[in-house]
Amino acid sequence: MRNLSRLIILKTFDAAILGGGTSGCVVANRLVNAGLSVCLVEAGPDYGPYSSGRWPREILDGKVSPVRTHDWGYHNTNKAGKDIDDLRAKVIGGCSAHNQCAALWPPAEDFDSWGSGWTYSELFPLIQRIEKVDSESATPFRGKSGLLETRMLGREYLTGWRKLFAESVAASGFSWLKDLSCSIPGEGWGFMHRNISREFVRLNSAFAFLDPVRESPNLTIISRTVVDKITMKGSRATEALCLTRSENDSVSTSSIEASKYILSAGVYGTPTILLRSGVGPKEDLSRNGIRENLDLPGVGKNLQDHPNIPLQFKPTDLGREMINDESKVAFASSAIVRARSSVRAEHSFDLHLIPTSGRISGDICYGTIVEDMAPKPRGVITIRGKDPNLPPLVDFRFFSDGEDAAVLSSGLLLARRIWETEPANSLVEKEILPGKSQDLLQYVESNNSTYHHPCGTCKMSSKDPEAVVDLTGLVNGTENLYVADASIIPVIPRCNINLTCFLIGLKIGEKVLENI
């Protein structure tokens, strides 16, 4: 492997993977193992293999998240103009290197709507090649022979107040779920599987999938390099134009030539690279003075995420004492509730309820984050101009149909009911947010944030006229340009999506090999 801070092209590669995040590392593993010469380009730093000892502590520490030291620094606003941190990693391994390590698979029915080749039964053999679950945490929904180690952090990590919350969840009628990746029953509660080692190291995609092939002469990794655009000649991609920032902060322009190009720059990076390459809605291209190479109306559309809203309480003296006690432990797990709102009839569950503790204006508080897991609105992302360093324009269009606000309001009532049930009620003095007299719909629309699971901006479909890629990940209208990341997800699954991104990397890697 050659690791270059300043790009020197020595040959044409069989494949250029543009983005070294969760999916990109998996694609690289698959193609290198198949004997292809691969160039992997990452905008952030690459600290080498885990064994190098060069990885920053905050990236390794699975107890701390999210990590803002290796982030694009994006921000968005909600409907009321409230600032929302938009957490997107800028480091090899992508969001798997800075997130909360939630390792959940979508319920089977969520995959089944994606199209031929993407049904749960067809994908389950690939799940086995992604995940290696700890034997004590194994369930029928888990992969057992893959490269990414996972385990459930359950009852043994419950601290005092979280035990009381779990007891109130059970007392409120929710059944125990052995694995939150199950389909049936829909409602219930359980603990997250996580890609965290027994030493609490965050096991990211680079450790699991890139480290095994780092020594291969077929792999070249180019870090601290932003992909500007792809040059198109007719239906064929011919080069990727890049900006490489060196250790002394100088920038050089370079190009990468390859037989195949796989965009894995993420839900924001991939569509914006396509737009700067002249691939996208003609009105967006014209507005930014970009010559049209391919009119694809769906580029940047279909943006989805799980909107959320907090419920917060002032604690009693007992509750305050329990929160202080929790600060003395290394890690605290939580009982995650899957619930069904009173609004939708088509889903067996459409909410996550996640207990939290924190501070409001310096004062300790308890609460629950209510997550809408089946949102209906579809947003849009576009570029501000030709400069690849400009942040994208992002509009989630949350609550544009009215239903999602009602779903989250229903979730607030469910969460409030749990906290009003003993023994958790003994921890609560009064409700701070939203407050019993607050109009819930108004509160939701003014105070929402997100679960940080954006996806869908290069929709995959064989039927939708706004699809950007087909069911093999090939960009429609092109011969050799693929997408492998969260942007191809057609409908957001009802779970944390990082494991799905690992799966997308392996699936698209297989499809690239089939088309050589």
Image (cartoon, rainbow, N blue to C red):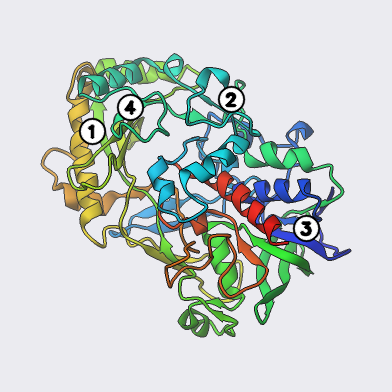
Q: Look at mark 4 in the image and give the residue it sits on.
A: 189
Q: Is residue 237 left or right of residue 451?
A: right
Element type where label 2 sits in the image? loop
Which of pointers 4 and 2 lies earlier in the amino acid sequence? 4
Q: Amino acid at mark 3?
A: Ser
Q: Is residue 163 left or right of residue 142?
A: left
Q: Which mark is residue 246?
A: 3
Determine which quarter of the picture holds residue 5: bottom right
Which of pointers 1 and 4 lies earlier in the amino acid sequence? 4
Q: Residues within 10 Å of mark 3 (few under 14, many from 20)?
A: some
Residue visible at 49% across and 55% down in the picture: 116
Element type where label 3 sits in the image? loop
Q: Is residue 366 left or right of residue 34?
A: left
Which of pointers 3 and 2 lies earlier in the amino acid sequence? 2
In the displayed structure, 509 sits above or below 53; it is below
Which one is closest to the eye, mark 4 or mark 3? Answer: 4
Q: Look at mark 2 in the image and give the residue it sits on.
A: 200
Q: Look at mark 1 in the image and give the residue it sits on.
A: 415
Which one is closest to the eye, mark 1 or mark 4? Answer: 4
Element type where label 1 sits in the image? helix
